[in-house]
Image (cartoon, rainbow, N blue to C red):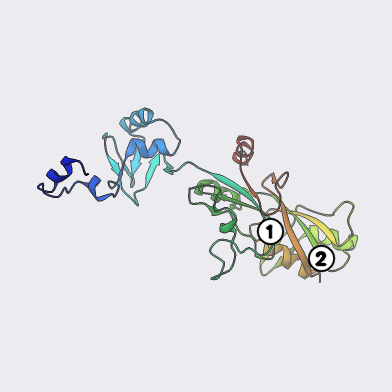
Amino acid sequence: MKPSRNKKSHSKKPSHKPASSGKPEAGIRLNKYIANSGLCSRREADMHISLGTVRVNGKIVTEMGVKVMPGDRVQFDDQPVNPEKNIYVLLNKPKGFATLKEGERGQKTVADLVANATPFKIAPVGRLDRQFMGLLLFTNDATMAKKLTSAKTRAQKIFHVVVDKNVSRKQLDDMQKGVEIDKVLIQPSEVRYVQGASKRELGIQIAINDNRAIKRLLEHFNFELVSLDLVSFAGLTKKDLPRGHWRILNEKDLVALNML
C-alpha cells in the first residue's frame, strides 16, 4: 500500500522548481568553481574575490555569490582556472592504435586504452602515428600541454628506431649535424647506436613536436624506418610501464615537468 501522503500530492499543482526536473541548477558559485580547480579553499577564494584578483570574462568580480555559467572564462591572478582537478596520464602506446580523433570508424584509438584512467576529459599531448609505439601523455591541463609542445620549452624526446640496414659512423655523425627538409631544420641533440644491438638500431634524442620528422630524417639518408618507439618524453620514461598500460603521474614527475 502506498503512503497516504502520495494521495494528497495529486491534489497539488505540479512543482516547477529546478530540483523536480532532475536537472542540475545552471551555473556554479564562483568560490566553488575556484575551489574545484584545487587552487585554494572556498573561504580563501572568497578573500581573493573581495581583493579583486578574480576575473570572469575579463571583468573583475568582487561580489560574493556570483555564478559561473557554462562557457564563462575565469581567471585567478591572471591565470586561467580549470574547474576540474588537473590529471596527467602516461600511456605506453602499442602499435595499431590511432591518436585520439585521428581514427576512422571502427579503428582502435589511444582513447580506448585510457578510457578507465579518469572520469575527466583528457587529451593527448602531441601524437604518435598508428604504426609508432611509445610514450604518450594525456592531460586536461591546457597550460601544461601548451608548455610541453612549445618550441621555447624544447622538451626532449628519445626515440629507439630500427632501420632496414646498417648505419655507418659517418652517417651517424651526419644525422647529428642536422638537415633542412621542406624549410624545417631537423637537428637531433644526439644520435647513437643502441648498446648491445646491431647497427640498424639507433637512439635519437631530439626536441621536436612532429614525430614524423624522425622518419623524414632517416629517409633523407636513404634508410627505411622499420619501427619507432618513443622511450623518453620530457624526462618521463617507460620504466615499470608495460606496453598498452598507463599510470597516473606522481608528484615527483610533476615537479620535473614544472621545472622545464
For the question of whether residue 106 can be seen, the reply is yes
| Disc 2 to disc 1: CB gap under 8 Å | no
Q: Alpha-carbon distance for marks 2 and 1?
A: 18 Å
Q: Secondary structure at mark 1?
A: loop
Mark 2 is on which residue type? Val
Mark 1 is on which residue type? Pro
Q: Is residue 124 left or right of residue 61?
A: right
Snapshot quadrant of residue 256: top right
Position of 190 relative to 59 (above/below): below
Q: Residue visible at 72% across and 67% down? A: 216
Residue receiving disc 1: 94
Location of residue 137 in the rendering, given as x and y in whole percent from the top left corner: 61, 50
Location of residue 75 in the rendering, given as x and y in whole percent from the top left corner: 39, 42
For the question of whether residue 77 can be seen, the reply is no
- The disc placed on residue 163 is 2
Location of residue 184 in the rendering, given as x and y in whole percent from the top left corner: 66, 64
